[in-house]
Amino acid sequence: MSGLEGKVIAITRPPERSQAAVDLVNDLGGIPLVVPTLELEAVASHSLMALCQKSGELDWIIFTSPASLESLFKFCPDFKENLNPLCQVAVIGPRTGRILKDYGITADIVPNDYTAEGLLEEFERVNLKGKKVGVPRTFQARDVLPEGLKERGATVYLAEAYRSTKPHDTSQVELLVEEIIQGKVDAVTFTSPLTVTNLFELAGDRKEELIKSLMNGPILVAAIGPITQKPLKELGIPSISPAKYTVKDMLLRLDEELSN
């Protein structure tokens, strides 16, 4: 029997990114509770439009999330046609790679470690001296990737493709905080540092109670990888994380943990 059988699993991703998690929790007999602690908003920023204009000059373009490429193709529908035919493409992980394929582009690089660090490791085998690299993403992301690319000699064109904001309607999150404190949830899952920090900021006066409820069990906390675990660690909250940083692997790891 699955460890998730009959268990309530909170999913803090935006709803448009939650379907695969919901399906897997259902398949494993769990009860998915989707409460987004962040919203993604595609933006036609000046920097994104400038990157579109430069598409013919790019040597590399790097997509660090499905949201970044969806936004780029939404606001620059002719991006692919204008792209330098010799331009190569890197993605942060297989899911972003699959969505890129839907736009008719195959990734040249998909790292084994689905992080900025993993991407940079792949670029150790690539000569980036004097190369023009486009990176559409959210400006709230860490600087590890653009800084690492610059250190390797690349000219980096950072473009704001989307913004991560707190949910406009916070009532669902407030309800989730209450349910965690009351022990009505069996596990909480996080897929980015912002899904963590937003939850605790939106908890307001109940933040300390929320931390205590997640510190001492029995509610399990699962994070997609070490970067998402970091803000949890800083709050003193123990969490589990999979060897491969995917939503599927995180939920299977949670299933395993709940089976024991």
Image (spheres, rainbow, N blue to C red):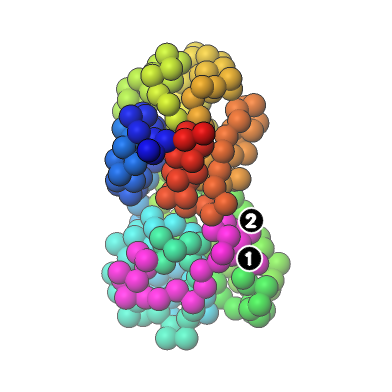
Residue at the limit of the structure toward the front, as seen here: 1
Which percent across, then down, holds residue 56?
A: 43, 81
Residue drawn where x is 41% and y is 62% of the image: 96
Disc 1 element = helix
Q: Is residue 252 visible?
A: yes
Which stretch is magenta?
Answer: 98-121
- 2 and 1 marks in contact (CB < 8 Å): yes
Residue drawn where x is 66% and y is 77% of the image: 125
Residue drawn where x is 32% and y is 75% of the image: 104
Taking the magenta stretch, the answer to whether it contains residue 202 is no
Residue drawn where x is 32% and y is 80% of the image: 81
Which residue occupies the foreground of this view, 4 or 121? 4
Label 1 belongs to which residue? 120
Q: Is residue 255 above or below residue 171?
A: below
Residue type at the position of mark 1: Leu
Q: Residues within 10 Å of mark 2 (few under 14, many from 20)?
A: few
Which percent across, then down, holds residue 205?
A: 49, 13
Which percent across, then down, holds residue 24?
A: 34, 46
The quarter of the picture where the N terminus appears is top left
Residue 228: image quadrant is: top right
Q: Is residue 45 visible?
A: no
Taking the image as shown, residue 217 lies to the left or right of residue 203, namely right
Label 2 belongs to which residue? 144
